[in-house]
Amino acid sequence: MGVIGSLSAIKEALSVVIVQYCPIHCKKKEEISENITRISSFMENAKRGFPDYDLIIFPECCLQGAGDNLSNLALRINSQEILELRRKCRDLKVWGHFNFSEKHDNPRKNPWNTSIIISADGEIVLRYRKVNPFCPFERCTPGNEFFVVKGPKNSILGPMICYDRDFPEVSRELAMKGANILIVGTHYPAPYSDKEKFLNQARAYENTAYLIQTSAVGPDSKSTYYIGRSMVVNFDGNIICEAPEGIEYVIKADLYPQMVDNARLEYTSQNYLKALKHRGISALPPNGDTSNPYK
């Protein structure tokens, strides 16, 4: 099970810091650097408060905000801003999850909404482009593939972005690829905080996976108000910890990815990934019916 834990971490635990903050909704490129400075400050402060943390997670739009000028402010994967985040992860020896508007290879197309995971060595080990943009407001080009990556402490990290989480197929795809920790970076507007809560719990429970949601908070330039209420959900669907609504906040949890893997192997009930492929084991031991009735 996951726990809030101590300021220091148990050696076997994946110690995760979740940052809920209000980015500048950029109108000019210089403001991106201000967001990078704030992100770096959160990372450094977390290292002082939780010196053993392994992974820090920031929300959707954490680099450029949710402004109207994202096509002009979109960044390349090798931009100076991304290089700065890579250096910070390497210097602090922590893994990091970040989200930004990525310039499309075709200049005539809208940018991608992209999340990256950076290792403690400063390497980009995963790049995911949002498959399900939020219609009708999000004008980014949709991606077309889901990815997972092996992280620290037996974790397999599977990121999705905001509206992706509303589709059960997305988290199921990541879980079927092996993800034992689902990461959801969001920029979710009011008044949908209760919907986010039950979706997070359902996605964790139905996939026997930890789910970490990290949310932006506060108003943007159009006075759309973003909720917050970042949370960590245990693989049984119960909430481990939750940030309040409406303010910047940092929460931390210690997770045990190996327990997820063991549960998926050994649980007889509430083991939905296994039951999808091995139906009726009690009547048809030892493997059940392995045919697929789902269309």
Image (cartoon, rainbow, N blue to C red):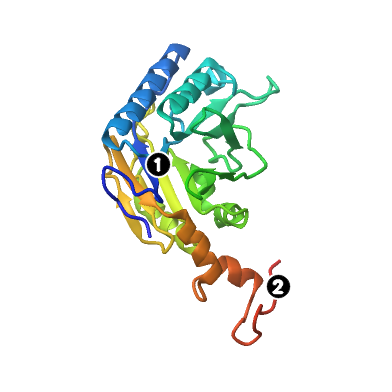
Q: Are marks 2 and 1 in contact (CB under 8 Å)?
A: no
Residue topped by disc 1? 214
Figure disc tally: 2
Residue topped by disc 2? 293
* Most foreground residue, 152 or 126: 152
What residue type is disc 2 on? Pro
Report x, y in % for residue 188.
41, 41
What residue type is disc 1 on? Thr
Left or right of 290 in this view: 85:
left
Left or right of 171 in this view: 224:
left
* Most foreground residue, 269 or 193: 269
Report x, y in % for residue 30.
43, 12
Q: Give the residue drawn at x 50%, y 49%.
A: 155
Q: Quadrant of the C terminus?
A: bottom right
Secondary structure state at the residue bearing disc 2 = loop
Within-10-Å neighbours for mark 1: few <14, some 14–19, many 20+ = many
